[in-house]
Every structure is written in structure tokens, then in C-alpha cells.
Amino acid sequence: MLKILRKIVQEVGNTGDLDSILHLITLRVKQSLEVDVCTLFLFDFENRRYVLMSTDGLNKRAIGQVSLGETEWIIGLAGSREEPINLEDAQGHPDFHYLPGIGEDEFKSMLAVPIIHQRKVLGVLVIQNHETRKFNESEEAFLVTLSAQIAGNIAQAEASGVVEGKHFSGQVATNSRFDGVRGASGMAIGKAYVCTPAADLKSVTLKKAIDDIDAEEQAFMVALDAVREDIAKAGERLSDALRPEEQALFDVYLGMLEDHAIGGEVVKHIRDGNWAQGSLCMVIKNYEQHFSEMEDAYLRERASDIRDLGQRVLSHLQTNHAVPTEIPYGAVVIGEEINPTMLGEFQARNVVALVSMQGSANSHIAILSRAMGIPTVMGAVDLPLRALAGKELVVDGYSGHVYANLTPEKRQYYTNLVEEEKVLVKGLENLKDKPAITPDGHKMSLVVNTGLMSDVVRSQDLGAEGVGLYRTEVPFMTFGRFPSEIEQAEIYRQQLSIFAPQTVTMRTLDIGGDKSLPYLPIKEDNPFLGWRGIRITLDHPEIFLVQLRAMLRASEGLNNLKIMLPMITSISELQAAKYLIHRSINELREDGLEIVEPEVGVMIEVPAAVYQAHHLAKECDFLSVGSNDLTQYILAVDRNNPRVAELYSSLHPAVLMSLKHIIEQAKRSDTPVSVCGEIAGDPIGAILLMGMGYKKLSMNAASLLKIKAVIRETSLEFAQNLVEKIADLDDESIVQAVIKAELKRSNMDLKHFGIRDNN
Ligand code: PEP
Ligand code: MG
């Protein structure tokens, strides 16, 4: 059964349009279960009726003609109860009545299983037999499993059909929304431009015994050189937008083509007598499989880089290489897997937004688009690419949503949002040099989160008061090996000197979880609960000490360094790290450097640290709350998984309670505490944090002026009252509603809080 199931699911996955998918399902189910009839009804969300869409065994002329009300008949029953209805004799059921023209009167037994996708009943799959017998458990299990597995395909095909205006008008007939995760913040509207791979690796077969091995090898080398050149050019095209350090991402990419890596293996296969195209595909397939099976998210994503490189080399071998495309201004680039080279091939300034079906916030393309300020949604798994080509899309990089096929009213709504955002951003420019002071005179300190150099440059223009979180793993990602002490020191010195005398809080290497380095592969079943952050660096003092010495070395004479430790769960980790910091200071002092001891702080980002906040605070100089991970660990919701994205909210009462607890504990020892997760850059979040007593917020440069504006409009008293009002609320939606009502009551400008009256 499992084999058959897999085969059907695979076949469905390879079928594009809705009609063919539905036909295939009814055909295969009838064959596999050896039943007399298999029929599929889809729910028409506009008319709220189940429409017969495909049948094998009943009258095919009834397709598209017969429909049933929401709760009518056995179909409506299975749909409304959201569970299978298994009847020995359907005709004896009180909800049964004859449906003219369908021809089902001769069938006695019936099993109706709802097809549910993301909590919505899309339709009902039915099997019927002549005989009077209940379908057995394994038949029922088969149908339930199949329905669950094909629901996503049906949803996607429906969406495609609807946008093309050809098919059944299903749930996404208008105002379709596709969910992904936030890649880079911002909102944009534009025409979808589908970014397709250069060539199809799957279509190449293996040919042995080629006549001229040298010619084949030569052809491969030429293709390889051409791809190197393409990638270098793509990097150059982005040179206006990116700093040299960020362009190093392209070098990582190029490194994969080196002779000792993929290139060398392909040549070996050619010399064994295989033709170049086949050899290439074989090697790429092996690498791709190897990477895609890795648990580690960063490395899994490298599979897409490998595939892309393979496709590029193949397109040159097949001499069908397309010249870089000119795309019109206002393009929303969408694709299965968008990577930096693809972006470099376009005129980046013409791209208003990016949407990738694969990948997460950690993909290279997401890192680059954040640096370039292009709103981006990653992991939009259900995006119907072909159907959306040329269509207008709204991309909301704040929420990770993409909208298509909007009604004029909705379109206007989002156009207004995009315009308002532009106006808001423009209007904020005059706040650059103004302090973040509330109307009742309370001063907040606003600092930035950095990683790439472009973050630094942008934040300088915005009047940031220093760096609250420098993610050192980002520059590590741009190397093909661990950077040396001197290489690191140079990078750190740049950050420190640009901001001096303001302080720069450097977080020690935070890899593991969903972030890893190509040169330190980590394979784990549960990476977020595994070898992460401080756990790795304490296990590898040789790596940690090099980084610490580089930071300290870079700080000589500037003395504006703070060191912050990620993923601390116990006092002993803090003590061990402090010991290594002191050792590094002593070593450098022995070498004659004048090192001023930096403040050392702890990130509070796991529940254990929340409950140990008091003890940790006593042992260090400052705390900083990593609300992104804290939310993930408190709510047990993977921060990068689009399937559970709706559950991930930093305004969940449990998260808010922990934020309050942390500041209360820090106050006991007078230890300064800041917040450096995304909540600090959210207007409502920032006000709540201020009301709780947090005085320092660290955020992405893009949020800085927005937050300054709301602080300048909101009194501390209002913020404190707001925190009081929501303190005992038990549900996130109620928290949101109360906040909105309170803001309204005080005549605050809701737009500044990202709240629209009708959302
Ligand atoms: C956090 O977890 O909130 C944080 C700031 O760190 P990162 O997002 O880099 O994990
Ligand atoms: Mg974190």
C-alpha cells in the first residue's frame, strides 16, 4: 500500500493542471483499491457548494454539472464534520437522496473522505462499491493518507487554474494569499517575473564510449570557464549595491566549481569515457542528494546552489545559454529557488521584491536582499509559478505573505499600504538627528543589528547610537574556511572604528540550528536543540579563542567593544566563556597590546536563561534578550517553518510574561538589559518593551526611524498602562485587540503602529 501511495503522490506531483490531477487521482484510486467508483468533489468557496469534478465509475457527463450544498448529502456531511464517513449501505442513510443524472443508484457502500489543506476543506474524495459492505480499516487509512498528501497539490493547482482564469473557481478565486517566511522586510507591488533554471539536468541521459575524450573534456572546461565568468559578472553587477565583503558570497559559490571539487569529479567521469553532459549530471546529482539529505538547514540549502551551478554549466554545454535578461522596472522576481547569481543577472534596481519557493531567512539570497533593502518572502512553498507569470503581486516582507488576483478594493488597500509606507519612510527622514524621547521626557536608546557592512553604512545615515548586536557568523559565511585571527580582526575593526566612540556589541559565533558554515557541517536530528551557539564555541576553544582575540585586538585604542554570548543555558557556560575571554586578554597584553577589558553580556534566548536571569545578571555586565529564539523556544515553534508561521508570535502572552520576568530579574542586580530580537523593531513591541522598563532596543536599520517616531509620540505613562492592561490576558488575539483599542482610544496614529483599521 505504501508503495502505491508513494507512486500516486509522485505522479500527482509531476502533473501540473487541476483537471489532470483530479482525473489521475480518481483513476489511480479506483485501480489501486479495486473499487467500482472513485469520485472527487471540490468545494467552490464562492458559491459554497461541492462540485463534482472528476469520476471514474459514475456518469462523466455529470462532471461540473452536479453540485451539493455545504451540508447536503453524504459529501456535505463528510466535509462539515471534517472526518471520513464510511457506510455499508449509503442509500439507507438519512442524508442520502438520489442525484439525478449521476448514476450512483446501483452502488451501496460508500466511503467519503474530506481533503483538508491548512485547516480548510478543499473537497471530498469518495469511493463506492456495488456490494453492501463497510470499507475496511486499511482502505480507509489509505484514502485518508492519500487525501492528506495530495491536498497541497490540489490547493496549488486550484490557485494556478484560478489565476489563469481557466478552471474551477476554488478558494483562491480572488485575493489569493500564499504564505512563506520573512526574508527581508518591506512591501511592494509589481509584475511577477519567473526566474527559471538555465537548463534541465533531469533531461540528460548517460552516454558511454565517446570517441573524443579530449574534445569532451575541453568542452566541459570551456563551459566551466563561461559559468565562472557569468558568476563574476553577476557579482560585478551588484557591486553598486554590495560591499566587497558581501560580494565574497559569490566567491563561495565559485569555490564549488574548483578543480578539486565538482569540476575535478566531472573530468574524472569524462576520462572514464562518459560524455560531458552526462558526467556533469551524474556528479551534480550525487552532490545534490548528499547535501539535500543533510539535517543542517544551511547545508541543505547548498544543494540548491549545486543544482543551479550544474544547470548553468549544462546550459553552456548545450549552447543554449541565455544572455542575462533585462527586466522592466517594477518586477517581482519569483522562482523555485532564487540565488544570488540570478539576482546579479538582472538589473537589481529594477527588482521591487523577491519571492522564492525554497529557502529560508538564512538563504544567501535573503541575506543579500536584506542588505539591498528588497522586500523578500522565502519558502512560499505553494506558489503557483507558471500561473503567476506576468500577474500583479503584492509582496509583504513583514509578514511573509504574497497576494495575487486581488479585487479592485483589496488592490487599492495594498496600494495604499505601499504608498503609505513610502510616505512614512520619507517623512521619517527628518528624525535622523533627533533623540528617541517620549513626550513625557523618557529617553530610549536605539541601536542597530548588523551583519553585513551595508547594514553598517545604512545605520550610520539613520543616527543609530551604536550596535546592539553584530552577528559575527554573517562574515564567517562569506569565507570558504574559518577566517584567521587577522582576517577577523580587520573586519571587526571596521565595525568598531565606524561607530567609535559608540559601543559595538559583538556576539560570538552563533552557528548551529538553522545557521551553519559550509566548512563546519553539522548533521543532527534536532539542530535547534542541538549543537548551537556557545555550545559549539566552548567545545572548540581553538575557534573561540581566535575569535575572541580578533575582537579584542580590533578594539585596541578604540575601547568600544562589548562581547555577547549566544544560547547560554547555564551559569557554567558563562563562567567558562568568561575564563576564555580573560585568557585572551592576558595573551594579548603579554604580546604588548593595550587591551581594555570589554563588558561581557549574555543573550537571554532560551527558557532556562529566563528562569536564571537573576543569577546570570549577577555574573555579567549586561543582558540582551534574543526574542526571536526566545519566542521559538517558549512556543515550541520553528521560526523558519512556513507551516507553523501563524503560531509564531512574540505577542503571545507567554512570551510577554517572560520578557517582563527578565527585566524584573535584571533590575534586582541593576544589570542593564536590552532587546535585540525582531520585537524591538516592531512598533507595538517597542512600546510594550518600553512600558515594561526596557531602555535599550536593538533592531534592523530599516526599523530604526519608525521606532523613533512611535517613541516620540507615545508617553511612557501610556506604555506602562498598556503593559498593565494586557498583563492578565490569556490569548494573543485578545492582546492584539486590546492594544488596538487602547491606541485608538488615545487617538494615536494607528498607521505608525502598522495597524490598519480594517485588519
Ligand atoms: C534572537 O534570537 O532574537 C537573535 C537576536 O538572534 P538571531 O536572530 O541571530 O538568532
Ligand atoms: Mg538567537
Image (tube, rainbow, N blue to C red):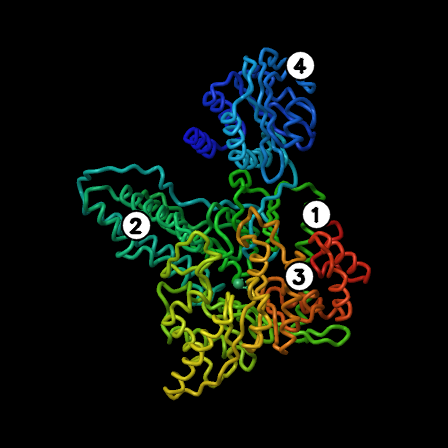
Image quarter hosting the N terminus: top left
Number of marks: 4
Q: Secondary structure at mark 1?
A: helix
Residue 50 location, quadrant: top right
Q: How far apart are labels 2 and 1 at the CA level?
A: 48 Å
Q: Which mark is residue 98?
A: 4
Residue 651 location, quadrant: bottom right
Query: In the image, is the residue at mark 2 within 8 Å of ligand 1 by its beta carbon?
Result: no
Q: Which mark is residue 223?
A: 2
Label 3: few (<14), some (14–19) or many (≥20) C-alpha neighbours in 10 Å: many
Q: How far apart are labels 4 and 1 at the CA level?
A: 46 Å
Amino acid at the residue labelled 4? Tyr
Query: In the image, is the residue at mark 4 within 8 Å of ligand 1 by its beta carbon?
Result: no
Q: Secondary structure at mark 3?
A: helix
Contact, mark 3 vs mark 2 (Cβ under 8 Å):
no
Q: How far apart are labels 3 and 2 at the CA level?
A: 56 Å
Reading the image, the residue beneath label 3 is: 656
705 with respect to 130 (left or right)? right
> Residue 406, image x and y in percent?
66, 42
Q: How far apart are labels 4 and 2 at the CA level?
A: 66 Å
**Mark 4 or mark 2: which is in front?**
4
Reading the image, the residue beneath label 1 is: 412
Amino acid at the residue labelled 1? Gln
Amino acid at the residue labelled 2? Ala
First along the sequence among labels 1 and 3:
1
Which residue lies at the image location 59% right of the left edge and 28% below the top edge?
84
Which residue lies at the image location 52% right of the left edge and 77% below the top edge?
600
Q: Could you tell me if residue 329 is visible in this image? A: no
Q: How far apart are labels 1 and 3 at the CA level?
A: 35 Å
145 with respect to 584 (left or right)? right
